[in-house]
Amino acid sequence: MSRVNDFVVRFANVNGTGSASANYLFAKSVFRMGVPVSAKNIFPSNIQGLPTWYEVRVSEKGYLGRKEGIDLMISVNPQSFKKDIASVRSGGYFLYDSTKPLHNEFLREDIHFIGVPLMEICNREFTDPRQKQLFKNIVYVGAVARLLNIDTNIIEGLFAEQFQGKEKLIAPNVKALHLGSDFIKENFSFPLDFYVEARDLVGDSIMIDGNSAAGLGAIYAGATVVSWYPITPSTSLVSSFESYAKKLRKDPLTGKNNFSIVQAEDELAAIGMAIGANWNGARSFTATSGPGLSLMSEFLGLAYYSELPVVLVDVQRSGPSTGMPTRTQQSDFISAAYASHGDTKHVLLIPSTPTECFDMMADAFDYAEKLQTPVIVMSDLDLGMNDHMTPAFKWDDSRKYQRGKVLTAEQLDALPQWGRYRDVDGDGIPYRTLPGTHPTKGSYFTRGSSHDENAAYSEDSPTYVRIMDRLLKKLETAKKMIPAPEVHLGEKKSDVAMLYFGTSMHAAEEALDILKNDGASMDAIRIKSFPFCNEVKEFIENYDRVFVVEQNRDAQMRSLLINELEIDPKKLIKVLNYDGTPITADFILKNVHQHLFQSIN
Amino acid sequence: MTYIKPKFAHPRLPENKLGYTRKEYEGSLSTLCAGCGHDSISAAIVDACFELNIEPHRVAKMSGIGCSSKTPAYFLSNSHGFNSVHGRMPSVTTGANLANRSMIYLGVSGDGDTASIGMGQFTHVIRRNVNMTYIVMNNGCYGLTKGQDSATADYGSISKSGHVNSFEGIDLCGMAIELGATFVAQSFSGDKAQLIPLIKAALSHSGFSLINVVSPCVTFNNNQGSTKSYDYVREHNEALSSIDFVPVREEILTEYDHTKLKVVEMHDGSLIKLNKLSPEWDPQDKLSIMTALHKSHERHEILTGLLYIDSESVELNELINTTNVPLNTLTEKELCPGSEILEQICSDLR
């Protein structure tokens, strides 16, 4: 039976050989044919030489989560042949560089082998040693295009876009593409029993990674000061901000920068600079991953207690410690929610798509300034570093930056009295002043030591308690401001429900779809922020049991739900994927079925 | 003991050119130990700002943690202050400076806050030439935790409890010069005549200015055998120069013997006049000052005065080509590219 637009292709390459752009070309060409596609990089913490994989799922139904079972493996890395051959599903295909014969012991009876002499073709057709190496990648893209019925004109169009200004590179790329395509035409039957057929299913979607989207969101949000320390997988977020800023943020008259970026000496300094800039009235952020979050904790406590806005993006990776720096996880939730010693609690935003990375990044600055507290955007490696099909970004030109309660000199003059930490409006949010505003009014001493409503040092117990309680009140205000959860209700209310967040969304929605088709519909909720909005508790209370889907070992979100909402732990069933690869619908279903089966018996 | 200062001021207090009296540069009453060297430094900061005709609210007072870092409460009460976390004042100041390059940033720190926990940030704020004045109130010990040796305590110095320091002390000035600091001075809290012009010069310098001020801890490090006691410093202080700072366009009246004078013109046109006491030293030559520092160390002397200045200094915002307008004043108009450009970006991603 042939399958149209529903299969998984995996490329096995050697890190640092230029394969990434060739593989992206393949994914993009499927997208250009109007078919939903999702691509995942599975790469080592290495610069050159170790195995790396690129997995592309093509899905007519628009399922963008990862899927187990490889239908077509393209392996140009002899280091990983054995493992790669083993990972192909029974009846699937293995395309390899047949310049050298395949070792007999690797052969499998139940899969098809497609040998394409990539090295031989390139050695014959190209003279430049670098081209001989690089064009191997394009030759296999051509072969795969032929096998899967992908229109080579589309790929040629992508070359034209990619090599704008370097037009002489187009012809050899096109040549390599056709060498691969023609080799299949002459030696194999095609297409395979699964292939791509053009559709109109991607609408106005774009393809972008979450880090680029968040960097662009920060540009639109008016961030001006960026301090950072390089760490995978957050580095490309600041690179994105920088490249957009260089194009979009030059002062037209002087050519000078309407932004400043400083690569700090460590994460301590990165967050310190961001806090200093926000204290002084500029929108400033930093981006990091788990180890950086640990280092930033002390400063986050200072910002929380002295009530300063700051935006931090945590692009989570597999911990603990150095962990697996190039593998994904959602394992910083507890450390982010309660970062720093003493009683602290922070606002978290949890995007699921690059579009939400863009939107939440822009909103994060408004929330941070309105609430005068740190806001942490909880992305992860899967979202941050992989290209995703996602709705186009939108911006309302009438939108004004919401800078919160900042007093001007005129307002200070008009006020009979002012105290930095007084709760004038009853929402727990005081009024702040910026340095240099007024010659004689509004100055105060920002400090992490205990202070009274006028910002004066105080060790008076009732005063301390009053301020700490007001900070809680402020977080109650936050709950009404930050994004409410997304609730999915079926036609008939179910007894059990599913709760998920962040990049588990695609796999969870796919699993829910399958359950629905099996007649076992389940209501669901996607959490988008912390502290939990009241809707979260109301939702959970309506069900006997709730599957809590997360990508960490210790069920961190479940712990937060229990801790914050006093929910009976027995009610919250763990579904935990923490092997460093993005979660799949199969994994969720397996866990759900297992639990339901056990509870019946 | 009261912590509230009397509001009464003499009706005929002298005013500076802005019409402010010295009183308007003061802070609340110090809660440090009576006789603490840090209080003298606070007083010198007040005098320097008053004499320089700085508007108090244009100064941002930055600090970390420790006795020294409490002092911003005791001067310039019309300025915003930021008492950050231990050893991290430089990063907070860097961020603040990037947000608004038009203000004056005055950081105060201690020897623990700078030479131990804050050593990393101290070196990098120098390297970036952040436009700020960084005053180290250096007493060689941890006062707030009862007098442990700090990293600037000299080898062999004896603490109040009789403990003999077995490690070499870090020379912050020598290190700062090696790291490329563009203004490095050393002084003694008890020498107001030297300290005030140094602070004035530092505040006027464009770029990073370090003033390492030996400031005896009267409670924990003022005993016999300590190399940071009042008596020891007075006996071993060797001034490199006497200094006079002349702000831009101010009438120059000086009694110095001009044959011995070294005049350095600052970025903004103001002048530093140095009456050289040490013949082999030139404040714009790194080699000669490094030699002088090493020689003074061998002689167990503390070299004071303006040690080094690079009057061609280029500060951070210039180095990274930031716009002249303070970034914190930019609005949606300058910062947000708008929906049309966003649509274009999206169409390139299809």
Image (cartoon, coloured by chain):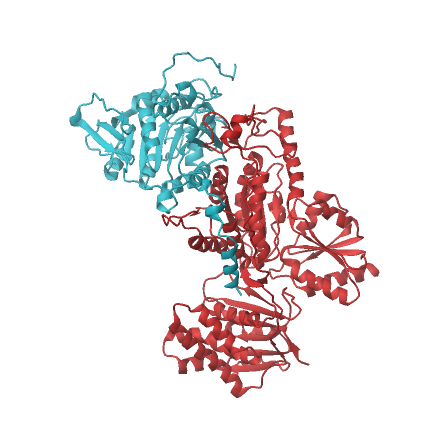
Chain colours: A red, B cyan
Left or right: residue A249 versus residue A524 is: left
What is the x, y in percent for residue B99?
Answer: 45, 40
Question: Can residue B191 be spotted in the picture?
Answer: no
- Count of marks, rendered view: 0
Quarter of the image where the N terminus of chain A is located:
bottom right
**Residue drawn at the location 42% of the way across and 30% of the way down:** B59
Between residue A269 and residue A285, name the one nearer to us.
Answer: A285
Left or right: residue A584 versus residue A418 is: right
Question: Can residue A581 be spotted in the picture?
Answer: yes
**Residue drawn at the location 54% of the way across and 68% of the way down:** A53
What is the x, y in percent for residue A548?
Answer: 71, 54
Return the residue found at the far left.
Answer: B259
Return the residue found at the far bottom.
Answer: A186
Tell me which corner region of the image, top left, top right, bottom left or bottom right, holds residue A461: top right
Quarter of the image where the C terminus of chain A is located:
bottom right
Tell me which corner region of the image, top left, top right, bottom left or bottom right, holds residue B287: top left
